[in-house]
Image (cartoon, rainbow, N blue to C red):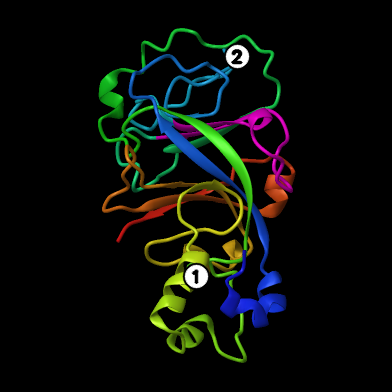
């Protein structure tokens, strides 16, 4: 709900309304097996035996940071409505992505013979992972009206920019304003959160790219000093289920 003191700007704020799917990540502290097809952070992937498991240039297997089963996820415009999307990253130097260090797989057909022996994913591969333990995931569709860190959010408040307007508010109003437009946490789509700056402002080709997935610092997830990571994709690629050009970015305070 839009805060009372922003009601006069409701029509302006409504211009920036976007749908998102919030993700609640539940640490698998008892290490009970997570099913092969379910949505999760870490864990063993649904991986068809016909495909070659991804490796980095050093020949080390990539590890799966996230698996999203869209049959478990509320519908979002342009996003798949079925199938499994996976994010694999290098077990070392993941903060400096190079060719082969990031692979995205989309499996539309889930009736395939899959790998069952993952003994090659030895524990040492996970030592540098920012995600420290497997998580099961749950999803909830919500509406957002903007994010102060996202370059797509450019409202005007009686001719003032967001930050100019914020200076005119009381302490309580500033806190409410910040909370309303502070879009952190794990999520699909909608606005992105950054601890520093939006990388899309430096690359014209990325200006219109959408947030595909955001993974934030949590109880058992840490990106540097309480940072956050984002995966971006063009609207056309997302609509066409083409995940070969996904851009990965992370920052911390």
Q: Secondary structure at mark 1?
A: loop
Residue 121 % position (x, y): 36, 18
Mark 2–mark 1 Cα distance, whole angstroms, equals: 44 Å
- Residue wearing tag 1: 148
**Where is residue 158, by image quadrant?**
bottom right
Left or right: 146 with respect to 129? right
Tell me residue 90's x, y (percent): 37, 35
Q: Which residue is mark 2?
A: 50
Q: Is residue 190 above or below residue 26?
A: below
| Residue 154 seen in this snapshot | no
The N terminus, quarter of image: bottom right
Q: At 61% from the left edge and 58% from the top edge, which residue is drawn?
A: 209
Residue 191 screen position, x and y as percent: 57, 59
Residue 144, position in %: x, y?
61, 60
The answer to whether residue 235 is magenta is: no
Query: Pointer 1: residues within 10 angstroms few (<14), some, or many (20+)?
Result: many
Pick the front one: 40 or 89:
40
Above or below: residue 105 compared with residue 209: above
Which residue is found at the position 47% from the left and 63% from the top?
182
Which class describes the residues within 10 Å of circle 2: few (<14), some (14-19), or many (20+)?
A: few
Magenta run includes residue 74: yes
Please tell me whether mark 2 sits on a helix, a strand or a loop.
loop
Q: Are marks 2 and 1 in contact (CB under 8 Å)?
A: no
First to last magenta residue range: 65-89
Task: Give the number of callouts.
Answer: 2
Q: Is residue 5 above or below residue 106?
A: below
Tell me what residue is drawn at x 35 percent, y 18 percent.
31
Of all residues shown, which one is farthest toward the bottom? 159
Asked whether residue 144 appears in the rendered view, the answer is yes
């Amino acid at each position: 709900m839009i805060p009372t003191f922003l009601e006069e700007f409701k029509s302006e704020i409504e211009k920036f309304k976007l749908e998102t799917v919030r993700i609640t990540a539940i640490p698998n502290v008892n290490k009970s097996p997570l099913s092969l097809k379910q949505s999760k952070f870490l864990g063993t992937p649904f991986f068809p035996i016909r495909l070659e498991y991804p490796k980095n240039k050093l020949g080390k297997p990539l590890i799966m940071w996230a698996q999203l089963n869209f049959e478990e996820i509320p519908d979002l415009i342009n996003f798949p409505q079925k199938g499994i999307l996976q994010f694999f990253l290098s077990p070392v130097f993941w903060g400096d992505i190079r060719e082969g260090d990031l692979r995205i797989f989309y499996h539309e057909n889930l009736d395939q013979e899959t790998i069952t022996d993952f003994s090659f994913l030895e524990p040492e591969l996970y030592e540098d992972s920012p995600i420290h333990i497997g998580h099961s995931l749950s999803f909830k569709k919500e509406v957002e009206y903007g994010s102060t860190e996202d370059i797509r959010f450019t409202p005007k408040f009686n001719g003032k920019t967001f930050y100019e307007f914020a200076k005119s508010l009381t302490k309580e109003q500033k806190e409410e304003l910040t909370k309303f437009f502070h879009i952190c946490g794990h999520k699909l789509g909608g606005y992105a959160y950054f601890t520093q700056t939006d990388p899309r402002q430096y690359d014209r080709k990325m200006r219109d790219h959408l947030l595909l997935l955001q993974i934030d610092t949590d109880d058992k997830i840490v990106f540097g000093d309480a940072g956050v990571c984002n995966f971006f994709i063009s609207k056309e690629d997302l609509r066409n289920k083409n995940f070969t050009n996904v851009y990965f970015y992370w920052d911390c305070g």
